[in-house]
Amino acid sequence: MKRFRHKPTDSIRTASTQRLCGCLRGTVAGRACKRNRSDESAFTLVEMMIVVAIIGILASVILPSLDSAGAQSLQAVARVLAADLQLARSYAIQNNSEYSVTFDFANSEYEITHTGSGTHAVPENPMAALSEADGTYVVNLSQMGVAPGKTNPVQLGGVALRDSKSRETEIAFGPLGGTGPIRNEDTVIWLTETSSGPTRYVRLIVSWVTGQVWMDGPEIFDSSDTNQLFR
C-alpha cells in the first residue's frame, strides 16, 4: 500500500506566505512581506503605524452606527487604546528609551510622550485633530468616531495595579518593552460605557514583564464587587 507523507506545517506556512507576497507585489504590504520573511513575528514602527491608522479609520467608520450597540462601541475604542499602548512599547524598544502613556480622566483622553533620556520623537498620530500641536500624540475618547457636536459614550474608567490595586495615571514602557523593574505588577486599564442599560466595561491588562496587552470583555460592571476588575 502506498504511503502518503504529509507536508510539514512550516513548509505549508512558508509556501502560503510566498504566494501571499506574490499577490501583494508592488504594494506597501507586499514590501513589508518581502522585507524579512525569516522574522515573521517582528513588526517595524512603520507597520505598527499602519495598524494604528487602520484601526482608527475602522473605528471612525463603525462607531457612528453603534449608538444602540454600546458593547461593540466599547470594544472598538478598547482596540484603539490597545494598539496605541503597543505603539508606545515599540517606540521604547526601537529607541532604547522610555515612552509613557499618560491618562487624563477629567477629559477622557490619553497622550503618548517620550519620558526617557535624550531627544526622541513621539509617534505621529494618524487620527490627530487639526488643532493638535506638532510633536504630540493625544487621543480624546469622547470625540472618537462621532459627528461634530456629539460625544462618544465610552469613557476612561481607571488605571490601577493588579495586585496592590494602587491607582495610577500613567504607564511607562522601558527599553525592553516591559514596565519593570520600577513597576513589578501588571497594570489594569478599564473603559466604561453607560449609553443604555447597565454600565459595561472592557478591561486591558498590561504585563509588567513584557509590556504585552490583553483585552477582555465587555462585561456588566458590578459596583458591589470590588475585585471584579482585578481577577
Image (tube, rainbow, N blue to C red):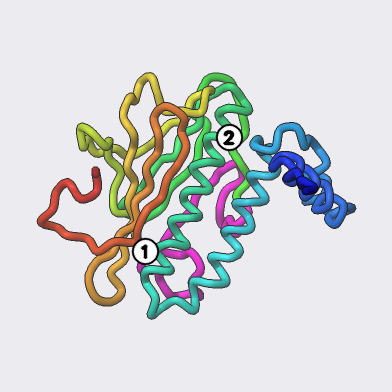
Q: Residue at x 72, y 40 (%)?
A: 8
Q: Is residue 55 magenta?
A: no
Question: Mark 1 near mark 2, Cβ–Cβ under 8 Å?
Answer: no
Q: Helix, strand or loop at disc 1? A: strand
Across the whole image, how many numbered discs are drawn on residues? 2
Q: Is residue 32 among what the camera can see?
A: no
Where residue 217 appears, x then y in whole percent?
Answer: 35, 58
Where residue 169 appears, x then y in whole percent?
Answer: 32, 39
Q: Helix, strand or loop at disc 2? A: helix
Q: Residue at x 49, y 79 (%)?
A: 65
Q: CA distance from mark 1 to mark 2?
A: 26 Å
Q: Name the foreground residue: 128 vs 61.
A: 61
Residue that numbered label 2 is attached to: 90
Q: Is residue 6 among what the camera can see?
A: yes
Highlighted range, magenta? 126-154
Q: Name the foreground residue: 7 vs 154.
A: 7
Where residue 228 appears, x then y in whole percent?
Answer: 20, 50
Q: Is residue 150 magenta?
A: yes
Identity, as a three-letter code, of the amino acid under mark 1 = Val
Residue that numbered label 1 is attached to: 154
On screen, residue 5 versus residue 198, left or right, reads right
Identity, as a three-letter code, of the amino acid under mark 2 = Ser
**Quarter of the image where the C terminus is located:** top left
Q: Residue at x 69, y 44 (%)?
A: 47
Tell me where residue 41 sits by quadrant: top right
